[in-house]
Structures are given as C-alpha cells and as structure tokens.
C-alpha cells in the first residue's frame, strides 16, 4: 500500500483506458466510412434505376444485371445441388379440415360450458 505503487497503477489504468478509447474511436470511424460507402452505392443504384425507367427499359432486369456484375465469384463458386425425386408424404386428396383421407384418429372438440354440472 505504498503511495508510489498506487499512483503507478492508476496511471497505467488511465493509459490503458485511453488506448482502448482511441481504438474504439478508430473502429467507429471505420464503421461510419463503410456505412457512407454503402449509402453512396445505394444512391448510385437508385439513380441508375431511375435513368433506365426514364429510357423505358425494365429497371428490374437492369438491377439483376448489376448484381451479377458485382458478384461473379460468388455465383461461380456455389454448385447447385440436384434434389432426388421424392414422393409426397400424403396423397393429393388429403385435407385435414375435411376429415377425409386422414388416418384413423379424428379430433372432436370438447363439450361447451363448465366441466361439472350444476
């Protein structure tokens, strides 16, 4: 409990806090810059969509083309899986609300009113 040890500890603690705060501020600045870039990209896409609409083109098709240009590597790396032909679990005439085509059990609502008579 020497005073110089306590002072050194407090100074080290303050320096660590300052270092952590500076790191947090840097992370926040990077995040703001990234958000700014995303907003700018969205704005560019909206402008391109509006211009294509003014020209009479289909803006949805244009948007799909832009997305394909942005992500050419992602679509090439994924291989579509072929699903095996599965038979349906129930027949085509199954309707749980009609009561037909189901199993042997049928649900019936309980009696209305209190359970014990008066």
Image (cartoon, helix red, strand yellow):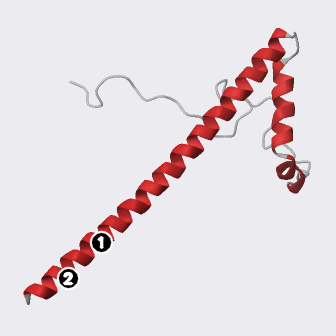
In the displayed structure, would residue 115 be above or below residue 2?
A: above
- Left or right position of 86 against 102: right
Q: Is residue 92 visible?
A: no
Earlier sequence position, callout 2 versus callout 1 = 2
Disc 2 + disc 1, Cβ < 8 Å:
no
Residue 10 x/y as whole percent: 19, 76
The picture quadrant where one finds residue 9 is bottom left
In the displayed structure, would residue 63 be above or below residue 3?
A: above
Count the marks: how many?
Answer: 2
Q: Quick one: 103 or 24, which is closer to the camera?
A: 24
In the displayed structure, would residue 63 be above or below residue 26?
A: above
Which residue lies at the image location 39% right of the left edge and 61% below the top edge?
A: 22
Give residue 8's mark. 2
Q: Residues within 10 Å of mark 2 (few under 14, many from 20)?
A: few
Q: Residues within 10 Å of mark 1 (few under 14, many from 20)?
A: few
- Left or right position of 107 against 95: left
Q: Quadrant of the C terminus?
A: top left
Q: Quick one: 115 or 19, which is closer to the camera?
A: 19
Residue 107 x/y as whole percent: 55, 34
Which secondary structure lies at badge 1? helix
Q: Is residue 63 visible?
A: yes
Which secondary structure lies at badge 2? helix
Which residue lies at the image location 77% right of the left edge and 20% below the top edge?
A: 49
Which residue lies at the image location 90% right of the left edge and 52% below the top edge?
A: 76
Give residue 54's mark. none
In the displayed structure, would residue 30 be above or below residue 110?
A: below
Which residue lies at the image location 71% right of the left edge and 23% below the top edge?
A: 46
The picture quadrant where one finds residue 34 is top right
Q: Quadrant of the N terminus?
A: bottom left
**Residue under circle 1?**
15
Alpha-carbon span between mark 2 and mark 1: 10 Å
């Amino acid at each position: 409990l020497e005073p110089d040890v306590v002072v050194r500890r407090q100074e080290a603690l303050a320096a660590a806090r300052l270092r952590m705060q500076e790191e947090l501020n840097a992370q926040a600045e990077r995040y703001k810059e990234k958000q700014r870039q995303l907003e700018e990209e969205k704005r560019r896409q909206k402008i391109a969509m509006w211009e294509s609409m003014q020209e009479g083109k289909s803006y949805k098709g244009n948007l799909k083309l832009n997305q394909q240009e942005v992500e050419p590597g992602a679509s090439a790396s994924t291989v579509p899986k072929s699903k095996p032909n599965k038979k349906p679990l129930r027949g085509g005439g199954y309707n749980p609300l009609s009561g037909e085509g189901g199993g042997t059990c049928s649900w019936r609502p309980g009696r209305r009113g209190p359970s014990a008579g008066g």
